[in-house]
């Protein structure tokens, strides 16, 4: 009986640790980025609100790494923050083509839809995140809060 409890506890700990670190992109994805890479420099630029610089670095990164869903997600984020909403949609959709379960891309695409005034599409991405997040996840919570804020504000 004691062994079974230990095995269950160990399996649960592994599951929680995996769920906490495998977020599918977003802010915590920066932890796994090689230092000095275009992607690392772009994330640093984003953190400093230097979105145009980040866009240039991310366009280079995605040209060199066209199957990197995280790179495409960050490119969408930088473009959206720079005010290039149509270009952001293209990058987010590419990230989701590469990784349909990319939680960061679903969150940020939902936020882009809110910026464009499309609440229904944002809610669709919230529903997808609800399915992807077995435990509460940051991306779901953030998009849910953004939707609540959108609903509370005049448009």
Image (spheres, helix red, strand yellow):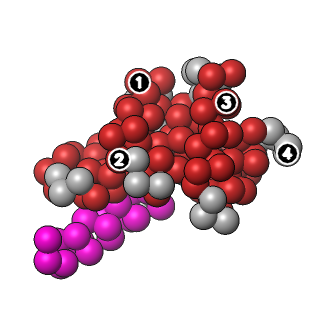
Can residue 124 be found in the magenta stretch? Answer: no
Q: CA distance from mark 3 to mark 1?
A: 19 Å
Identify the secondary structure beneath mark 2.
Answer: helix
Can residue 149 be found in the magenta stretch? Answer: yes
**Which residue is rendered at x = 58% and y = 50% of the image?**
52
Instruction: Look at discs 4 and 2 and give the one toward the viewer.
Output: 2
Q: CA distance from mark 4 to mark 1?
A: 27 Å
Q: Which residues are magenta?
A: 138-155
Q: CA distance from mark 2 to mark 1?
A: 18 Å
Nearest to N terminus: mark 3 or mark 2: 3
Percent position (x, y) of residue 53? 65, 49
Residue at numbered disc 2: 85
Instruction: Look at discs 3 and 4 and give the one toward the viewer.
Output: 3
Determine the image quadrant of residue 63.
Answer: top right
Relative horizontal placement of residue 141, taking residue 46 as reference (left or right): left
Nearest to N terminus: mark 4 or mark 2: 4
Residue at numbered disc 1: 97
Confirm whether residue 21 shows in the render: no
Relative horizontal placement of residue 41, taking residue 10 as reference (left or right): right
Residue at numbered disc 3: 60
Percent position (x, y) of residue 136? 43, 60
Identify the secondary structure beneath mark 3.
Answer: helix
Q: Observer-nearest residue: 79 or 110?
A: 79
**Which residue is rendered at x = 33% and y = 52% of the image?**
112
Q: How many marks?
A: 4
Identify the secondary structure beneath mark 4.
Answer: loop
């Amino acid at each position: 009986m004691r062994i079974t409890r230990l095995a269950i506890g160990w399996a649960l700990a592994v599951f929680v640790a995996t769920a906490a670190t495998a977020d599918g992109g977003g802010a915590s994805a920066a932890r796994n980025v090689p230092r000095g890479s275009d992607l690392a420099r772009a994330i640093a630029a984003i953190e400093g609100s230097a979105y145009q610089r980040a866009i240039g670095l991310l366009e280079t990164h995605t040209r060199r790494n066209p199957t990197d869903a995280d790179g495409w997600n960050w490119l969408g984020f930088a473009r959206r923050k720079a005010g290039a909403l149509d270009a952001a949609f293209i990058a987010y959709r590419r990230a989701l083509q590469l990784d349909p379960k990319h939680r960061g891309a679903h969150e940020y695409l939902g936020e882009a839809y809110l910026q464009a005034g499309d609440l229904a599409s944002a809610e669709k991405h919230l529903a997808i995140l609800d399915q992807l997040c077995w435990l509460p996840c940051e991306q779901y919570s953030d998009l849910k809060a953004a939707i609540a804020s959108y609903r509370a504000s005049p448009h």
